[in-house]
Amino acid sequence: MAYQLIELASVDGAGKTSVGRDLAKGLDAHYYYSPPECLRDIREHVRGLGPEAGLAYYMLGNHVASNEISEILSMRSVIAEPYTLSTQANHGFTLGREITIPGEIIVPDQIIYLTASWEEIEQRLAERGESRKVHENVPRLMKVAEQYDRLLSDRENVIRVDTTGREVEKTVEIILRKLS
């Protein structure tokens, strides 16, 4: 596989982080979690400033991530999550408008879109207990999923995988088969 950027996209609870880490191991790729580490300390503060500030924060995160990912891609593949599609889907829903990613941001060569049943997503989110965020509720996530479906509908570089009832290892096996 040539060096490439693979973006994992999904609503919260569908398995991005667990699958992303194992997929990176399976591909001997770099796992890149966004927002970039240099911005994480201010995330909660920015959330309190409203949705436009949140969008600005994640767009800045996409710029920083794009620069960092570009450097890594010179040496190896990158599995990024969440990245540009998350910004578009979540903030497109929250703000009720189309979110465009600036052209200078590196785009993924491949998108892996994970889904799961809403019952399983709710169960996974409930298991987070105290660490569950207020925005991690199924009615909101259903609307964000509609944004993802709209954003991905005309793209050819999308692999869709349903994680319902599947162990992470099995999901990664399916993705690896589809990538090869």
Image (tube, grey):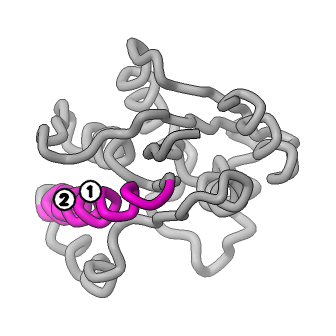
Query: Which residue is under mark 2?
Result: 63
The crowd level at tag 1 (other Cα within 10 Å; few <14, some 14-19, many 20+) is: some
Above or below, comparing residue 55 to residue 144 in the picture: below
Choose between 121 and 68: the one closer to the eye: 68
Above or below, comparing residue 19 to residue 175 in the picture: below
How far is mark 1 from mark 2, CA to CA? 5 Å
Picture residue at 56% right of the left edge, 36% below the top = 112
Q: Are marks 1 and 2 in contact (CB under 8 Å)?
A: yes
Q: Tell me the element at label 1.
A: helix
Identify the magenta region.
Answer: 53-76
Residue 66 badge = 1
Q: Could you say where residue 58 lies in the image, as x and y percent from the top left?
A: 24, 60
The crowd level at tag 2 (other Cα within 10 Å; few <14, some 14-19, many 20+) is: some
- Identify the residue at the far bottom of this view: 41
Choose between 74 and 179: the one closer to the eye: 74
Choose between 120 and 72: the one closer to the eye: 72
Kind of residue at badge 2: His
